[in-house]
Image (cartoon, rainbow, N blue to C red):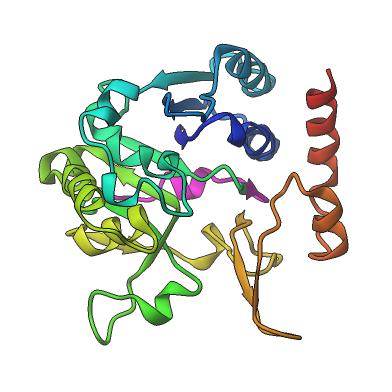
Amino acid sequence: MNLLYCGDSNIYDGLIISLLSIIKYTDEQLNVFILTMKYKDYKPLNNNHIKVLNKIVKEVNKDSSVQLIDITDIVNNCLPTANINTRFTPYCMLRLYADQIKEIPDKILYLDNDIVAFKDITPLYNTDITKYELTGVLDYWGKHFYQNRIIKKNYLNSGVLLLNMKLIRESKLFEKCRILCRDKKMLLPDQHALNYLANSKKILPRIYNEQAKLTKKTVIRHFTTTFKFFPKFHTQTIKPWNIEELHNTLKVYELDDILEKYKKIRND
């Protein structure tokens, strides 16, 4: 199973929890690729992080591995200039450079670092995407406001994307997205670009990227920013490593066994 994450050192906590949750439900070989870069005052992930992550995935399958790929030079060749100073860090757009990296296989599952598995993700990975550039779940809020067609809702959340890199390389989808992010300022840069430029998308069941509330059927929970309307309108961002808020506000306790392992790893 090929997995892709992207980011700087700030995603380290999320990577630990995400990978711990995945190996809890599968002993499949995991080939994990992590893209990082050097940019201004941001600190990229380093080999010390990767040693810890490798130890985690090898607990259940000795053939699993985590590989860090620094793509600083590649990104500098086409910086997302128009969106470089938005509320999203430049690292959010690193996945759009995956087509230029020879190590990235033809099929790979991209995951945000605030993704947690609550069941085996193997059925998701085994989805047939032969005819599609990418597959994902509708964005919980964006499906109401952003869509390519007036009638059909097809605006995907980019936190969980099963990618057909062979088709993406052939269609130059990521290249087109990079150019759009370079030239046009957007609210959700990479997500907007992928949705509006993709030629073929497959919509997956909500259980594979639950952005609102954990249910008994949830396979993947995405702890993304949500909107709250009472007592007044505000945004709410609670990540898996925000343990106190996870318990007190979201009332999520199902992660506690994983969080105990996470705390031990971070304290070692």
Above or below 184: residue 138: below
The number of numbered discs placed on residues in the rendered structure image is 0
Q: Is residue 128 magenta?
A: yes
Q: Quadrant of residue 217?
A: bottom right
Q: Nearer the viewer, residue 87 or 189?
A: 87
Q: Position of residue 52 (x, y in %)?
A: 67, 17
Residue visible at 27% across and 60% down in the picture: 201
Residue at position x 24%, y 50% from top?
Answer: 133
Q: Is residue 265 left or right of residue 219?
A: right
Vertical arrangement, residue 266 with respect to residue 190, above or below: above
Which corner quadrant of the image does residue 153 belong to? bottom left
Q: Residue at x 17, y 38 (%)?
A: 169
The span shown in magenta is: 116-129
Q: Which quarter of the image is occupied by the C terminus?
A: top right
Measured along the vertical axis of the image, is residue 200 above or below residue 111?
below
Which residue is at a point 70% across and 37% down the rendered structure image? 24
